[in-house]
Amino acid sequence: MSRFKLYIEYEGTRYSGWQMQKNSKAIQGKLYEVAQRIFKNERIEIYGSGRTDAGVHALCQAAHLDVKTVLAPEIIRMKLNDELPADINILEVEKVDQKFHARHDAISRSYIYQISRRRTAFAKPFVWWIKDKLDFTKMEHASKLFIGMHNFVSFADKDDEEKSTKVLIEDLQMKEEGDLILIRITGSHFLWKQVRRMIGVLVEVGRGNLTQNDIKYFLEHNSPTPAKYTAPPSGLFLEEVIYKGEKHKREFNSLITITSCKYSNHK
């Protein structure tokens, strides 16, 4: 049995998330189905670095594949991509030690969320379009309250697999790029729906409906309020999974371009 590390990108709109489950179409399940066809009767196991919610995308999800094979990593990548649908792509395959575990060995993960300030004909599956005017400065100031070790129980759905609701947020960056507001969150790990509720609360600060004091309260008490502001999955991307000795591989930039054009009258 050999172990291979997979780097995977996917457009999550059509899927119920990463994790394989009965009666639903998941990324892990599609990979497993394709791998079974390629490796025929061999026993196969696929583990991801963590779950992504239904409709959430990934720029670089990490996973490991266990299978008995003599195929080279690059051949495995090509064979998988030949069978996978267009919205799932294996970026790279590398052979790793049997002790490597995609989830347990990850030391941090980063997500990017994209908010559009205008309606867009092309990018709807990849942004959250917000009609209301948002105060970027207020959002940015409030976002700093999330940095550090906090109890995010107010920002997560109950999950029996999680032993603790404490999460270390290592960094949170915000920037404006054209008609987009970009938010990058890097943390030790993330709870179920945590990122989307952090985004939703920041948007309410930008709208003027919540304040920094509200965020402090949510971090200090178990409150049901953030659940009401859960951001849609369309704008969320798992950006990177980082392992020991690694750093961010990409610049913090938008994944699409949304700019307004103005036409002059020509006679």
Image (spheres, rainbow, N blue to C red):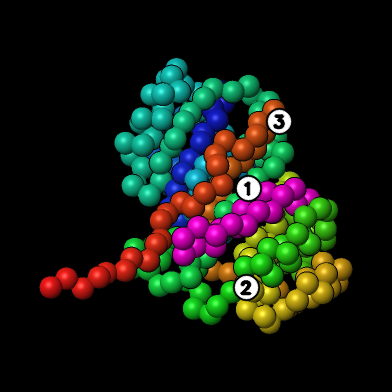
Residues 259 and 59: in front is 259
Q: Position of residue 89 (x, y in %)?
A: 40, 41
Q: Main secondary structure of the magenta part?
A: strand
- Mark on residue 135? 2
| In this rendering, position of residue 83 left or right of residue 265 | right
Residue 207: name its quadrant.
bottom right
Residue 257: name its quadrant.
bottom left
Q: CA distance from mark 1 to mark 2?
A: 24 Å
Residue denoted by label 3: 244
Say which residue appears at 45% left-offset and 23% top-offset: 73
Q: Residue furthest front?
A: 267
170 in the magenta segment: yes
Q: Nearer the viewer, mark 2 or mark 3?
A: 2
Residue denoted by label 1: 110
Asked whether the beta carbons under mark 2 and mark 3 sit within 8 Å of each other, the answer is: no
Number of numbered discs on residues: 3
